[in-house]
Amino acid sequence: MAFLLDLIEQYGLFFVFGNVLLEQLGAPIPAYPTLVITGALLERGEYSAPMLLLTGVIAALIADYAWYMAGRRYGGRVMAKLCRISLSPDSCVRQTEGVYMRYGPASLIVAKFIPGFASVASALAGAIGTRSGKFILFDTLGAVLWSGSAIFLGSLFSSAVSDLLDILASLGKWGVMLVALAFAVYLAKKWWQRYMFLKDLRMARITVSELDQLLKSGNPPTIIDVRTGVAQQGGRIPGAMVMSVDDDLSALVINPETNSEVIIYCACPNEASAARLAKKLMQRGYTRVRPLTGGIDAWLAAGYAVEQQ
C-alpha cells in the first residue's frame, strides 16, 4: 500500500489522467475516488489544485470526444456496442436517449454523475448531429463539475482521507488486498446483477430465416420494433410497428385468441429489450411471442430488406 501511495505522490497527475481516461472510455475502473484521494493529498504540495483539475478535465474530454466522433461516424451502431460491454446492458441506450432528447446537450453537465450515461450520451450526441462546439462546451462544464466536486470533497475531508490512507499503509500488503477485495466485490455484484437479468429473459427465440419464411406465408406475424428513435433511422423490418418497452400495452391491438405470432426485435445484447416486452405480453395472455435472435443486426447481416420510416 505504501508503494501505491508513493506512486500517487510521485506520478499523481499521470495516474489521475490514465484513470479518468480509462473510466470515461468505458473501463470499470472508478476514477472519482482517485480524484478524491489526490484532492486530499493537495496539502503535501506535489501538485496544485488547478493542475489536478485540468488533468481530470482534459482526460475526460479526450475520451468523450472519441465517443462523440464514433457516434457521428457510426451512428446507433456504436451505442449498441457500448451496451454490449456494459455491466448494465439492458436499457442504457434507451434511458440515455430519453434524458438527452429531453434536456439536450445540457444533460452532459451532470452526465458523469450517472453510471453508464457519459459514454453513451457522448456517442448519442455525435449520432444525432449535435454541433461539436456545443458538445465541447457542455461536456467541458460537466467535466469541470465532476472533477472539481471530487477534488473539493478530497480537500474538504483531507484529514479523514489521510487518516484512512495511513491506516491502509500501515496494513501493508493487507491494505492492498483490502482495496482489491472491495473492487472485486463491486465487479462481482455488477456481474451477478447482469447474470440474473439475462437468466430471467431466457425464452424461445426465432431466427431471421424463420421470420422471413413467416413473412412470405399467408399468415404473417405481428412484428414489433422496440429500438430507440435514433436506432430506427437505419430502417425497420417490413411491416414492423414501433413500441417502447415502457409503453402502455393497452394500445397494442392484437387478438390473443388468434394463431398469429408476435415477433419482437431490438438492437441490444441478448435481445434484452425485446425479451422484456415479450414477457410483459405473455403476462397479458399473448402466448405466441418470441424475440428475434440477433435482432435487426442479424436481419441486415442476412441480407434481408428493410423499409425506411
Image (spheres, rainbow, N blue to C red):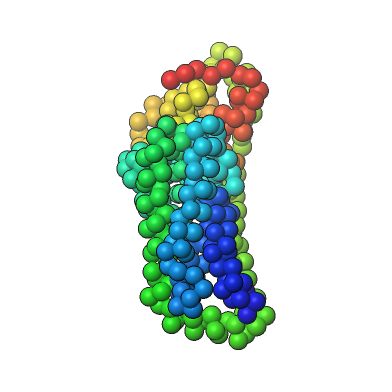
Q: Is residue 227 visible?
A: no
Q: Quadrant of the C terminus?
A: top left
Q: For the point 53% across and 31% down, which residue is it?
A: 73
| x and y, in percent, of residue 152 in the image | 38, 69
Q: For the point 60% across and 25% down, which residue is it?
A: 299
Q: In the picture shown, does residue 189 fall above or below 232?
A: below
Q: For the point 58% across and 32% down, which residue is it?
A: 295
| x and y, in percent, of residue 33 in the image | 49, 67
Q: Quadrant of the N terminus?
A: bottom right
| Nearer the observer, 39 or 104 | 39
Looking at the image, the residue that sits furthest to the right is 173
| x and y, in percent, of residue 40 in the image | 46, 75
Q: For the point 56% across and 13% down, which residue is it?
A: 218
Q: Is residue 6 left or right of residue 60?
A: right
| Nearer the observer, 81 or 35 | 35
Q: In the picture shown, does residue 110 fall above or below 47?
A: above
Q: In the picture shown, does residue 231 fall above or below 99?
A: above
| x and y, in percent, of residue 214 in the image | 59, 19
Q: Is residue 138 left or right of residue 225?
A: left
